[in-house]
Image: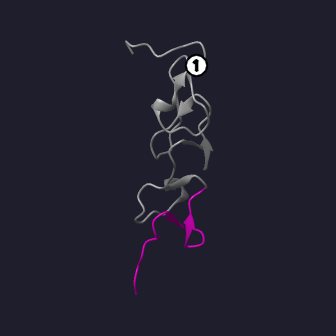
Amino acid sequence: MTCESCPDGLFLNQTSLSCAACPTNSRVLNPANTSSVLECACEDGYSNTSLECSLCRLASYKSALGNVTCTACPVNTNTTGVARVALTECLCALGFFLSASA
């Protein structure tokens, strides 16, 4: 008899006792012995809402794997799209410029 864990990116579905993929735009933090969909974490640029990962909205970003909310860009900045992954993607809004003292 050989006991194995699910391969990287999969978790053990406790109902079917088979390996299953995490929801879209998520993966497991610790691939070894993951036994619940609750251990799936949202990718960079995605935030957890229930058991789904949603795009970070305009003017926000998320730079790490995890089930946390997206971070808002600083005041008077915005992003050029959704699902941004770094603070550096927050650009000055129209009519504003990056101060040399910043």
Residue to which mark 1 is pinned: 93
Extent of the magenta region: 1-23
Assign the C terminus to one quadrant of the image: top left
Residue at the image point whose x is 42% and y is 62% from the top? 31
Residue at the image point whose x is 50% and y is 44% from the top? 44
Specify the farthest residue to the bottom: 1
Residue 2 belongs to magenta span: yes
In this image, 90 relative to 101: left or right?
right
Residue at the image point whose x is 55% and y is 73% from the top? 17
Residue 13 belongs to magenta span: yes
Q: Nearer the viewer, residue 36 or 64?
A: 64
Main secondary structure of the magenta stretch: loop
Splitting the image into 4 quarters, where does residue 49 fall?
top right
Q: Amino acid at mark 1?
A: Ala
User: Could you tell me residue 9's position as x and y percent?
Assistant: 49, 63
- Counting every numbered tag in the picture gives 1
Q: Is residue 91 above or below residue 102?
A: below
Q: Is residue 29 above or below residue 80?
A: below
